[in-house]
Image (cartoon, coloured by chain):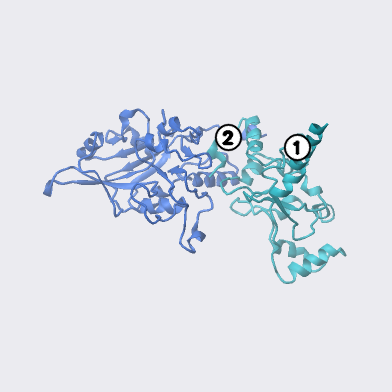
Amino acid sequence: MPFLAGALAALGAGWVGFPHAIYKSRPQPVDFSHKVHAEKAGTKCEDCHAFREDGTFAGIPSLSTCAACHAAPMGTTAAEKNFIDAYVTPNREPDWASYAQQPENVFFSHITHVKLGQLKCEQCHGDQGASDKLRPYQVDRISGYSRDIWGRTLFQSKAAGAVPGMKMDDCVDCHRKQGLSHSCLDCHK
Amino acid sequence: MIAANKPNKIARYGMSIDLDRCTGCGACMVACAVENNVPPAHEGATARKGITWIRVFKVDNGEEGPARRSVFVPVLCQQCGEDTPCVHVCPQQAVEVDPATGIVGQMPERCLGCRYCMAACPYHARFFNWWDPQWPAGMEKTLNPDVAPRMRGVVEKCNFCHGRWHAAKERAAAAGKSEIEAGAYVPACVESCPTGAIRFGDLKDAASEPAVAAKDAHSFRLLEKLGTEPKIYYHSKRDWVRQVAAAPKPPNGKENARG
C-alpha cells in the first residue's frame, strides 16, 4: 500500500508536475478561430498560409493579409474588435508563436512535400481548420523548442491524431514507409 | 502518388580543380566562410586551430633561383567515396556518406568532439571548434539562413555547400521536378573562383566537367594510393606538379598564409 501511494505520487509528479516545470506557456496574441474563417469566409489553408514566388513557405501570414479583410469589423465579436483595435489600427504585427517551428539545424521544404509529395496540410499539422481556439504555446525552458516539436507525442498514440508528431522520428517513419531517402543531410543543415 | 515522385537518381558529386588556372587569390576561402557561417578567427587561433573548410596551399618544386616554380593547391574535404576514413573511426556515427549524393556529411549534434576523425583524415580537412562562434556586432545579420552555425566542441568540414543543395532541391520542387538539373547546384567556392579553376558536377554524368577531367591523363587525386576514392580531381599539364603530388612529401610545402 505505501508502495502504491508512492508510485502514484511519483507518476503524478512526473506526468502532471514535471511538464509544468519544464514548459513555459504563453497565450497567442489574438483569439483566432480557424473554424470561423474556414466556414464563414470559406478560406482554404493556402489563402493565408501562402508560398512565396520562389517556392519558399511564408508560414504565418503578416498583418497585411488579415487587414485586407479586417480593416473594419466584419462581425460583432469582441475578439475581432480587440484584434482591430490592438493590431490593425496601430498597424502592429501580432507576436504569433509558431507551434511547428523547427530547430535551426532542420531543413524542411513545404513545397517539396505539398507539390511533389502531394501531402495535405492536415497530415502533419492536424485538422487545424476545425479548431475554434488557439492553444497556449508551450516552449521548453531549456532548449527553447515548441512542445509540439519535442515532447507532445511521447505518450500519445500517433493514430489518435489530435496533435501529430513533428519529431525527427515522425519524419523518418514516413520517409521509411514511402521508401524515400532519410539520410542525415536530407533534412539537417 | 508519392511513389511516382520518388527520387531515384543517385548522384556522385565531385570537383575538378585546374591548378594551372589557380592564381592563389583565396576568393574560394572567403566565399566558403561566408556561405557556411564560419566565424572570423577567434583570438588565439592558430593555423591548426582556425577553421578553413577550403585552404589554398603554396607548393614549389624545391629549386632555388630562376629554376623555382610554384603552384597553388586549394585543399578541401576530398569527399572520399570508399572506406571513408572519418566515417570508419567515428564512435558516434556522426559522419556518413550520403547515399543520394556521395557527400560526406558531418552531424554536429551527434559529434562528441573526440577528434578521431581529424586524426584519421589524410587531408587535414577537418576542423575543431575550440570556441563558440562569435561574430562582430552587426555581422550576425549576414549569416546564411540555410546553414546552421556549429557550437564549441564539435568537428566540422566542407560538405559541398549542402545548404545550396537543399535550396536547389526546393527550387526544383517549386518547378515540379524531383531532380536537380545539372548546373543548378554549385558550391560557393566554384561560383566565386575568378579564373574558373574549380568546376563542379555529377561524376556519374559523363558530360560533366569533373567526369571529363577524371579521365584526363593530366589529372590526379591527392593520396590516391590510399584507395579512398576521393572525388576531387586536380589537373595540371606541368609534369613537376604531378610529380610533387605523387611524392610522399612535397619539397618545402608551405601554406599560402596570406591566402
Q: CA distance from mark 2 to mark 1?
A: 24 Å
- Chain A, colour shown: cyan
The type of residue carrying mark 2 is His
Q: Is residue A36 left or right of residue B181?
A: right
Residue A67 drawn above or below residue B245: below
- Chain B, colour shown: blue
- Host chain of mark 1: A
**Most extreme residue toward the front, as rendered?**
A2
Residue occupying image coordinates x 81% and y 48%: A130
Residue A156 is tagged as 1
Which residue is denoted by mark 2 in the rendering?
A182
Q: Percent from the top left, x then y, of residue B100? A: 51, 34
Q: Is residue A99 visible?
A: no
Which quadrant of the figure contains the N terminus of chain A?
top right
Residue A111 is tagged as none
Q: Nearer the viewer, mark 2 or mark 1?
A: 1
Please tell me how crowded label 1 is: few (under 14), some (14-19), or many (20+) other residues with Cα within 10 Å: some
Q: Percent from the top left, x then y, of residue A69? A: 77, 63
